[in-house]
Image (cartoon, helix red, strand yellow):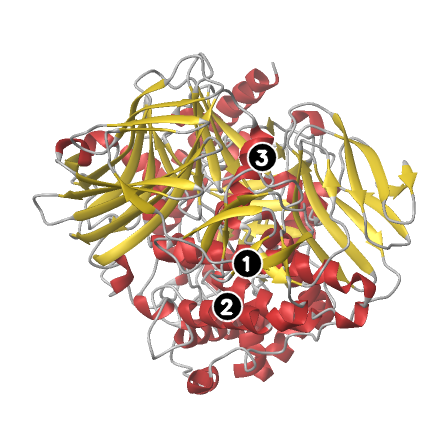
Amino acid sequence: MMQHRRLARCIGWLGAFISVLSAAVSAEVQPQAANSDQAIDLFETQSCEAAANPVWIVPNSHGTATGWLTGFAHERNYMVNNYGSLLEAQENVGYPFSFSEVPTAIAMKELAPADFKRFRAALGTGKVSIANAFMLEFEPSLVQAATIMRMGRSGAGWFEDVLGIRPDNAWFIDVLGVTPNMAEYLDLLDIRTMMHVRNAETRDQLYYLQAISGARITVASMNNYAQWRISYRETGPLPQHWREHMMRELYPEIPYQPEIPFVWPIGAGDYSAKPEDPQRLQEMTREVTDQTSRASCLGTLNDYWDSVFSSDLDQDELETITTPSLFAYNAFWGNLPQVKQGFRATESRLVATEIAASLQSLERADNYPAQRLDDIWWLLLLNADRALQWGAGAGDAFQGDGDWNYTDRDRSANERLDEMHDYFGHGYAFDPVAWRREYPFFWAATQTRPANSVCEASMLEDGVWCQGKLEAMGTVELESAAHELPMEEPFDGTVETDSLKVEFDLRSGDIVSLQSDGMVKLIEGRLNELVWYADHQTPEQNFSPTDLLAPRTGREVIGRTSEIEAEFKQYRGNVYTMVQVTSVADDGSHFERFVFIPHTGDQLRFQTVSKNVPYGRMLVARHDLEEPIEKSIRGTPFGYDRDRPRTGRGMEDVRASHDHLYLGLNETIAPASLWSSHHLENDRGIVLLDQGLSGREWGETFVDHFLMNAQPHYRGKENELYSGMPERTFNYAIIASTGEDVARSARAAKEGVYPLMETGRLRRGIEVSDTIVVETVARTKNEIRVLAQNYSSTETRATIRIPWPHISANLTGSEAMQDGELVPQTENSTAALYAFAVAPGDAFELVLKTLEPVAEVAIREGWEDLVPPSKLHRLSFRDTSLLGHPPE
């Protein structure tokens, strides 16, 4: 009924509005004469503050923190200069704007200190606001929960420490898609609002986004963050046809909620400098008031949210969205696999190191390397900048000798992690996962192994693969050992172990049947088939093949391993039987598929190596179950989203981004965070695990796992990382599954990325109940924070046994009970057991007060301590002529 009322109201209002607009368009309206000598104040907000349904026109400037079409040094000059011009307009004519991203504030402080002082002063007047509580704009689907929490606390904390303002809005104005699980971490971070572009699941601008736990956030969505671009050009009175054009941009958006405040973001473009004639914006503001009969003002994002929360808003009238959105720019999920996998490895290693450091320091708080960890986190957070994560940009942003780039920061992060090894001690293997590890694990040493483990030397990496009994978030002693390589043995097409039976196509090497112990009937189909295709429908003049894929009907399959005769080798070790499949295509593409079949367990591990893949190819690993896939879910940070079954969308149901408008709604491509599962009606299926290769595309009977998008350049910008030459390596796995089990899937995914490490002895490990996944354990001040989530679809009682010394425990973030102190169910000299209610999918933090505080970290003032000496000079590079948008 609510939707019907909203639709009727919208149709009636829209019809009236279009009639008024048409009359205005047909009239010979003469614009007011612009007078550049006449003093104006664009920041006249009284009428909107007094109105119930004002239109807030919010200028902003939108670039990146680390580089996109140019490298780091040039990028930050563009950003500093653009904001400098906005500050000039703010001082001269009251031009308001909203600001985002800590690295840009640091750049302003370093390169233009006078502008930074002006910025601080403008914040005090309320004519400028900070729009983003996060350190920078990132792609939520491509980072893990621990990174999101650090991104939020580092960003809001920096703004509060340096500028005295703690923002509480998530500024996702370049996000590619939205998941209800975002409400989980925004709730944990005390962020009360979110603004995003693209693909809202409703045409309404203001709505609630609600996770399965009940966590809910107030959201405003928009189609674009830089509307009215033409109003920033030239000077003098606005031509009437320009006014009409800008009103036509507005009128499809504004009718849906006519009784509540509306926000309209404007700018000269992605990178917005000040308007050439600010009075044109004043003219357009008056035009909106005249045409809509609503008070309209230029203001900041804070002004808009203040209006929303001070209005007489009937909360029941806002739609509550509980389903994931479409995703834009779907080629991104296949771009730069080496970057995506490398980031995931560094991120996971950092989280594991922080967990180890936290636990090792509990007996000696002064031994916690707080500053060293904080420095590495800043390196990683910079590399989480959205364009880098997408694999979208010019080569200078990623690698090379000229600028401080992604590769420099990733290398530095890993070198610093290497240097921390001696801090932890020696002689024991520490496992950072909080449950008894189920699957084989990698040990990055060749002369030792964890006690009570069976190991084999790795054929592909420097280290050993083992199966054994480890301690959950605890240690086991290391013992000296010599490890043998697996031995070659005959291949007959079928590998049968204690837990699995795997049958290969003797011609192609694709897997044609898979059966685990628990399966009454085996999976028949074609698994791990490599397919590569070319996109012939996405024209370069509108989109780049590194941005967008056409629907499958617009792509040509160039080749597939099922059509190529393969060569085989088989090796048997103590942990795995490995089958090596070699395929060479007519176009010269060369593929090695290494399939690792464990002697115990139901997980197949794959390492696929491609060589000499030509430009213009998207390479996927296809897993075809040959029967309709009825149930599909994708892991996300803080939970999972369901893709099948779900109600289909129509263009009239969503706020579709321009790529969907151009090529039609594409509901079959989306990113997964670490895992996805795909099951038939009878519950047989697979769980697909990845180590950063996020892209999934599903058909009726199959799921394609994006491996690589090999292209000659990015929007004409050189970037050799897009090449499929000379070779690329892809790591992923599948579990033979007998039904959806999201907790087991999420745990298996964490096992695949959280590495073991050598440390000193920990006396005992943590224990958690079966549906709980612990993301990280971290220390700050006199607290240790355990970030975890319930992966049950029902409310349950979680238990966590804490073996570490602490004074008290508080629970925060649970939707099933109020925040507050917990009383242990049992307590003795070695451990305290806590039990508490958690809602379905509930994310929470268990905050332990510790006996001693750890050292405070310094407020970050710049990047000198993180940049390689050979590139320090790039930090002082200054060019005031870099204004507006970098050349495309």
Tell me the residue at 34%/65% (across/down): 69
Q: Could you say where residue 814 lies in the image, as x and y percent from the top left? A: 76, 37
Q: CB under 8 Å between callouts 2 and 1?
A: yes
16 w.r.t. 83: above or below: above
Q: CA distance from mark 1 to mark 3?
A: 28 Å
Task: Please name the residue that numbered disc 1 is placed on.
Answer: 349
Tell me the residue at 69%/34% (across/down): 842
Task: Please name the residue that numbered disc 3 is placed on.
Answer: 180
| Secondary element type, mark 2 | helix
Mark 1, Cα crowd under 10 Å, few <14 / some 14-19 / many 20+, is: many
Task: Please name the residue that numbered disc 2 is placed on.
Answer: 414
Can I make out residue 158 in this image?
yes
- Tag nearer the camera, 1 or 3: 1
525 w.r.t. 41: above or below: above
Precedes in sequence: disc 2 or disc 1: 1
- Tag nearer the camera, 2 or 3: 2
| Secondary element type, mark 1 | helix
The quarter of the picture where the C terminus appears is: bottom left
Q: Could you say where residue 380 lies in the image, as x and y percent from the top left? A: 53, 63
| Secondary element type, mark 3 | loop
Can I make out residue 276 in this image?
no
The quarter of the picture where the N terminus appears is: top right
Mark 2, Cα crowd under 10 Å, few <14 / some 14-19 / many 20+, is: some
Q: CA distance from mark 2 to mark 3?
A: 33 Å
Q: Amino acid at mark 2?
A: Asn
Q: Could you say where residue 867 lies in the image, as x and y percent from the top left? A: 49, 79
Judge left or right: residue 528 versus residue 566: right
Precedes in sequence: disc 1 or disc 3: 3
Q: CA distance from mark 2 to mark 1?
A: 8 Å
User: Which of the two residues, 363 or 868, is positioned nearer the viewer here?
Assistant: 363
Judge left or right: residue 624 versus residue 519: left
